[in-house]
Image: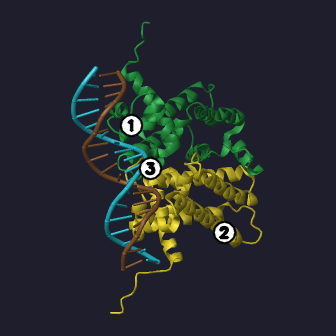
Chain colours: A yellow, B green, C brown, D cyan
Amino acid sequence: MVSTSDRIPASERREQILEAAASIFGEQGYSGATTDRIAREAGISQPYVLRLFGSKEQLFIDVLQRTCARILLAFDAAIAAAPEGTEDFRPFIGDAYVSLVKTDRGVLLSLMQGFILGHDAGIGPVARAGFMRIYDRLRDVMPAEEAMAFIAQGMLINTLIASGLPLELKHGRNIEELLECAFGDELSLVLEELNA
Amino acid sequence: MVSTSDRIPASERREQILEAAASIFGEQGYSGATTDRIAREAGISQPYVLRLFGSKEQLFIDVLQRTCARILLAFDAAIAAAPEGTEDFRPFIGDAYVSLVKTDRGVLLSLMQGFILGHDAGIGPVARAGFMRIYDRLRDVMPAEEAMAFIAQGMLINTLIASGLPLELKHGRNIEELLECAFGDELSLVLEELNA
DNA sequence: GTCTATATGTCGATAGAC
DNA sequence: GTCTATCGACATATAGAC
């Protein structure tokens, strides 16, 4: 037996941890999440998480920044992929966002957790800066009223996912309507993904 | 000296604690808030908070339910106060909501914290039920598309307040536009209130 | 109705070996 | 690059006095 070593490069470990942390932070919130839970999710020991990121707060901040970068990248790609002469980019960016929700749920939810912790001296400024960067990008390709409504819908989507409403089977007609309205055509795909 | 007793009826104490708890939970989140901080904010001892509410979780749930009741009441009042023959209730309910934001900021923020903790076995169901009740009320007086956009804007407002963005003095033109767009005419009043 | 004292558990962080 | 062991701080909750 060649005994594949379990040692892997720090850069790769960091990625694993960031992925795990986004998921746990997104579910439990910043204070509710523990570095130990994150460590186990990543398959390593708790002290090693802190060794690589310095502190729980720094880890959260890194998650936040990675999330923003991912969203901006997705938006840029959607804008670039839109047909020549497109005037209304909303459908393209919207689809990109819903796609992110499907694949990177924890990522978006931890961003939401960051926004909502605005009062925190360390986290607040980073979250606000991220929000502004994302909003500015939207404003590059649409007027203020549209950008406001667009980002508002994004916040609703985040809140719905975080609340777990889409997973609840027995809710009234109204909520089904709301989900269709908020998620659009891809609703069924999103629901499938959430149930997985 | 007649020595005014500090003993007050439990019902009144409960109110004080709920008010304090809404504010602290709203700022720090469910896990981040401590029963001790809430107790001090309410001017009593930490064990007494638990004596009156049983547990931290129960206290949070009570805060959530009170918040929902307050919002529903405000919406009902706004609908009732609208002129005879009103077709579009959105301006009236919208103003009512922004008014709530001004006076009961912590209340709305703790509701937001509840939504975002949907995964929690105890809190999730309560938060979801509250969301549905509020959305159903909106649907009573407007079509699905409008209700979706309306509640989405509400979520954006909550997120903006929680993030602290409106308090940051040096942000670009875009954010100022966004705030005007999201809060409408009452923006300056809201900002005043937030700064207080 | 309200407090003090405290049990009990947990979590972030550090030290140091391999 | 990764772990075990552990410290010290803090938080919820309980017991019981006034």
The residue at which mark 2 appears reads as A78
The subunit carrying tag 3 is B
Task: Tell me: residue B70, above or below residue A93.
Answer: above
The x, y position of residue B101, in whole percent, is: 59, 35
Q: Going 38% across and 23% down the picture, which residue do you hit?
A: B11
* Residues at discs 3 and 1 in contact (Cβ within 8 Å): no
The residue at which mark 1 appears reads as B59
Left or right of B143 in this view: A46: left
The x, y position of residue A110, in whole percent, is: 52, 57
Q: Going 39% across and 43% down the picture, which residue do you hit?
A: B126
The residue at which mark 3 appears reads as B117
Looking at the image, how many numbered discs can be counted on the residues? 3
Q: Quadrant of the N terminus of chain A?
A: bottom left
The x, y position of residue B93, in whole percent, is: 59, 34
The subunit carrying tag 2 is A
Q: Residue flagged by tag 1: what amino acid is it?
A: Leu
Mark 2 or 3, which is nearer the eye?
Answer: 3
